[in-house]
Amino acid sequence: MHPAAPARTRSALLAICLGLLAGWTSPARGQDAATLLEEFIHYTNIARTDLASGYAEQLLNTASNTDLAIVVDGSEFDSDRLDTALQRASRVDALEAIAGELTSRIESGRLALARDPQRIEEAVNMLAGTLRQRMIAERRLEAAGEYAVPALMSKIVASKDTALALACRDLIVSVGRTAVYPLCVAMEALDAATQQTICGILTEIGYEHAAPSLQGLAEDSSNTTDVREAAAAALRSLGANDTITLSAAWADLSANHFKGFASLLPYPADTENMIWSYDEFTGLQGTPVATELYHSVRAMQSAARSVELDPNNDYGVSLYAASNLRRENRAEVAGVTDPIYGNQDRSPQFYATAFGTGIGQQVLSMGLAMNDTALVRDALAALAVTTGDLGLFSGEEFGGPLRQALRYADRRVRIEAALVVAEAQPRSKFGDEPLVMAHLSNAIRGFGQPTAVVVASTEEDAQVVSAGLVDAGYVVLATATSVDGLTDAMTDASVVDMVILDIEPDQVDSSLRRLRGSARTAASPVLVFASGVDLPGMRAAYPAGGSIMAVDGNASTSGRLAAMNQLVAQASGGSLDETAALIYAIEATEAVNALAAGTRGEVLNPKEALPTYLDALQSRSGGLRMLIAEGLSTMDAEAAQVALIDAALDAAGSEQVELLGYATASVRSFGSQTTADQVASVLSLVELADESDLADAAAALHGALDLPGGAVLQFVN
């Protein structure tokens, strides 16, 4: 049974019961898919939702996806009536989910039929048949798209039937955009005559992502003059840039894949897309790769070609490293494997660090430009390993990417960028010193709850969504019926951790543009609610793996929460929970402590964190509190020493002993800055301490303060 069947079964049983009361009997199990579908259409159109639901339930439980597609695409079926019924059903609460599933399964069936290798081979052979056979074949092959290219190419290469080869050529032109990539892969390995044929096909199709392959063909002196001229003519017809090197052309294609150009992804709504290769014995071979990984894999392949041609092409190297990091991120979040690069001998982090700081800065810049939070964090992690003071802002005037990262919309990026800068302990001013210290202080202080905003078609819808967010632990900053309505409410927000759009489909694109135009939501994960017949289109418009996700607006509360968690994971690496916040606080404290103990001047002034340290000494506990105390012991400030001694006097057990040690270190470094009350309390502690470690620690502070020895003389015997 289909995963959604249990819920539908209950509604179907109810429909049957209601139908019996009305004199109706359950659909016979033997009824075929065509009859059941006609009944669904009929009862939907006359607003008998109970009966429509019952027939649809049996249809979905008994018919396969391909059965549905065969019925709908049959010559005698009235598809307009089905479209009308599905549109009506999508507007009825009781039928909306069924309409969405029926639409999805029909489309899945169509794809399965169209891409079946046996049906494709039959269709190719039918191109040499009667007029009717040719018409059927053309429809099938155009529907198969790039999946038909291997069979069509095999006839062009090997068939002795000139008319059939010409028909196959014309069919590839009709396939269009999706045929370009497999054609380019095959073209490099084929004979001169076929290469010329493919150049002509690519000219007619007219998509520029064929340019690197054509340029390579045109520049290869081992090719015949006819081939080189055909490739050059195709390049001119595409309007490709003929002033750049072949290495640069491959890098540009890699960049376009990295940016996720829609024209380069064959089937956005599919769970998998093909990576093509050519074998002289078997011809074109496709390897399915998860759609989340497709652009990253193709970007890596193109970047590798670029670097192979010119090892000094840093742009190509950066694209390879950035795409590799993104590929790993998306594979992990989606829970998929990569059959192309999944078994590399070296990790993506190896490439990100081994190429050095300059490449690392470029990778960071790419991530920032794409608002790819997960990639930005990976780049910062690599820079933390490779970057010292001298390379901190190399290659970019006034700090470039690192300074941008200090202002990024995600709070984790800001603190991680601040940590990179602080741990490098810069010796030259760069303009954002206070910002670095502010981010470190915020991390030490601790982060509050995650924040969210909601844009919905009505205020009532917004309130429903907001309630779910609050239950999930979010603070809802604002709700509105348009993005513009959020502006005032977000004025005091430094970052928005989640955006929910529950609006009409035709408003989504413009709303996203406005959100991305705001510094506060430029990188925020956006969850788009859609339902019924609109959901497949939304999912195709926003393919899996990015910072925007389309989900079923009718999903349960747990389903919505799961979608939010998945989106946050793929957009930025996961939610900022208490454990992650504590780790940031520890790392930030260690960085400030290192600055306080450092010898590189006062470019980053650790005393700017003093107010935060004083608060944290009271609010934090455990090991973090001791790190705070250690930092205070290295700060030449009366408030620091006074706070340490107060904390030591108020503590107990091993913590008191450790705090007394830090208080002693402060006095030894900066002299006594204590109050009269504290002196009296220290004297009292020395007199009353009855445990050896505590007595020794109190005595050390007493001695460092150089107090009169009267309180100690009583122990002389």
Image (cartoon, helix red, strand yellow):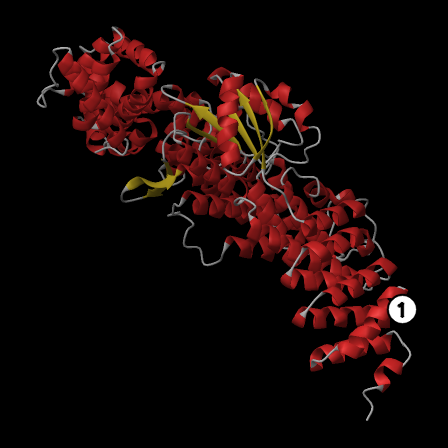
Q: Is residue 637 visible?
A: no
Q: Residue at x 19, y 12 (%)?
A: 38
Q: Nearer the viewer, residue 577 or 620?
A: 620
Q: Give the quadrant of residue 621.
A: bottom right
User: For the point 28% across and 11% down, which residue is it?
Assistant: 85
Could you tell whether 200 is left or right of 283 in the image? right
Which of the 4 image quadrants contains residue 112?
A: top left
Q: Is residue 240 above or below residue 714?
A: above
Type of amino acid at the residue the image marks with label 1? Ser
Q: Secondary structure at mark 1?
A: loop
Q: Residues within 10 Å of mark 1 (few under 14, many from 20)?
A: some
Location of residue 654 with respect to 310 vertically, above or below: below
Residue 710 visible in this rendered orientation of the protein? yes
Residue in view at x 17 percent, y 19 percent: 17
The residue that label 1 is drawn on is 672
Viewer-nearest residue: 455 or 198 = 455
Give 210 or 83, whichever is nearer the viewer. 83
Residue 289 coordinates in the image, percent (x, y): 37, 41
Q: Residue shown at 61%/28% (left/top)? A: 516
In depth, the one of 452 and 688 nearer the eye is 688
Q: Answer left or right for 621 relative to 437.
A: left
User: Residue 572: x percent and y percent?
Assistant: 55, 42
User: Residue reaching furthest bottom?
Assistant: 717
Q: Position of residue 470 (x, y in %)?
A: 53, 34
Q: From the top left corner, tell me how far across and down residue 109 is, in percent.
A: 25, 26
Residue 605 figure quarter: bottom right
